[in-house]
Amino acid sequence: MAIQQFQDALDLTPDNHPSRPDRLQSLGIGYDERYRRTRAMADLEMAIQQFQDALDLTPDDHPSRADRLRSLGAGYRTRYKRIGAIADLEMAIQRFQEGLAHSWSPPANRLTSGRHLLILYTEAEDWSSACRVASTVMALVPLLTPRYLENSDKQHLLTQVVGLASDAAAIALIEGKKAYDVIELLELGRGIIIGSLNEMRTDISLLQQRHPRLAKLLTELRDQLDTPTALTGRRDNQRYNTGQRLEQAIQDIRELPGFDRFLLAPSEDELKNAAAHGPIAIINISDFRCDVLLIRTSEVRTLRLPLLTSSDVRIRAKKHAMDKEMLEWLWETVARPVLDVLGFKQRPPDGWWSRMWWILTGPLAKFPIHAAGYHFSHSTDTVMDRVISSYGSSARALVHSLQNRPMARIAQELESIVLVGMQELQYAPEEIDKLEGLCSSMQLRASRPRPYCRDVLSALDDCKIFHFAGHGSTDPVDPSRSSLHLADGPLTVANLFESNLHAHPPFLAYLSACGTGQITHDGLIDEGLHLIGACQLAGFRHAIGTLWEVNDRSCVDVATMTYEWMKNRKMSDESVSGGLHYALRSLRGVWISENAARRALKRENGVRNAKVDQILEPSQSQRKERDARDIESCDDTPMYWVPFVHFGI
């Protein structure tokens, strides 16, 4: 019936009518859909014919031409797979090439042709051609989300290119490209929204010194785009015009001596300089292969991870089984090879811990690489027993943070800490009370605003540390709506995006809540749109949060030990990751001891698991629902120390 209606509409359309190509295209889509269900070759032939007729009537400079080239190419590709005629394959390749190169069409349509072309070349193992196409396609990704678009629109568009950057990087590695070139390619398709917003808030002091007029124009334009439309009342065309003026201003700045890389991806030297504080390991996950891109002061190199496959990662991510076996698998497939090549092969002498940063791509971003290993007494086959781990959302974001790292310690600068604890959790008030006592000994002025969104956001304007103890939730559809739960509603990622604290950058955001570093929307897994990332974007140099649900009692212990460590180390930048590392190793030690006692009881007395639970942890069976920040008790001793992570410098 749909095909008949499309045909009737076409029959009523004059040959020279401007809508005739659209109606031919619609009819072709109808036949193509029916072919996919009936496998009748007559339907496929009719689809190809309608697509060809629509293309013949489409001018060379028409913005729909790439889409029609893609439809026709897909038709030929389908026929090639059905009957195997090389002529059909060649026609498909030609149409996709033309669609990718059609500069008058929207980037999204050109990208679709490019992805089809990429599939054809990789299926044929023509890696040289695939690499050329991958480079062209990745150059289009930034054009997909121009600066004038709202973040919600960018999110929608970016779901179309999920995994593309990782595949492009893997293809480049197969083709033998240099490690830095691969990183540059990977960065084009990851952390796009965060990167764009970071650019809006980047330090332009050098530009202000040398070219004040351009700096003033840039500041005015980016401030207009950085302010939500709802607050300004600007219309879409005004945002578009402002975005175009901003792009032109950026191009003008890049023409100036010494500013040729203004707001571009970090250079190879900048990457190496960032590794002065510790090596950076970017783990790339692709169906083609999995690799680590290692950045050190002396080199940027690659390492193949032959035991790691993208299918394994996806399967384990869906199971959500974050247990001992998973940590051991992470060790064997990822962590051990990386640490061995970096020279971290044993536990360091006390007080000489080295740091490193992990940047995880695709579904691997859901995994706690910092906790990988064989965790039993006296084992050193763990990440935690060899290095202090921090995370980054992208190489660009990490370099940006490290370049703006103050050289001096900041103890004298610290003034206030904002403490928010939600009363519905049994241990959250205790956590806040303990921290308030610690802060007074650290000469920090504690502020405890009412747990309402407006009050908390207002308090952030004049704070150095923000500590939240309460419930958090991850939005599975729109990550920008993931939130901390306050008394009058959610404090969302989007709210924090809108907070710009860069004029007086705060030190630490400690989010003692569930899933504050979690993204459940697989289409946006590489964007870092979680509460931790939002705090970093707002201006916090450090952020501590969680990858999934956490235990209420353990939150108090981790926070207290972390702040104690920070206080004793004069609140240096290193003290944040070091404090969390110390706290997690301490809780891990308790976990090892409890499990050893559990095994001993089972061996000696044959006590059932439930009875052992009662003997070892009497509070577990009596715990009320409000005692946990969403975690459920289980038969084995839970690994409460695993979910906590540090992002920052």
Image (cartoon, grey):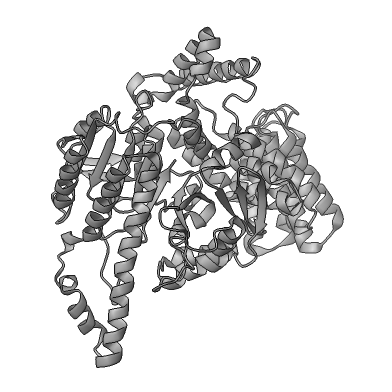
Q: Position of residue 351 (x, y in %)?
A: 41, 53
Q: Position of residue 27 (x, y in %)?
A: 65, 45
Q: Position of residue 393 (x, y in %)?
A: 48, 44
Q: Residue at x 28, y 80 (%)?
A: 597
Q: Compared with residue 276, is residue 60 higher up or lower down, i.e. above or below? A: above
| Side of 518 relative to 182 (left or right) | left
Quadrant in the rendering for residue 376: bottom left
Q: Compared with residue 131, is residue 79 higher up or lower down, i.e. above or below? A: below
Q: Compared with residue 230, is residue 593 higher up or lower down, i.e. above or below? A: below
**Image quarter in which the C terminus is found:** top left
| Side of 386 relative to 299 (left or right) | left
Quadrant in the rendering for residue 443: top left
Residue closest to the eye, 52 or 330: 330
| Side of 418 relative to 522 (left or right) | left
Q: Residue at x 44, y 22 (%)?
A: 225
Residue closest to the eye, 582 or 15: 582
Q: Residue at x 36, y 19 (%)?
A: 233
| Side of 479 relative to 435 (left or right) | right
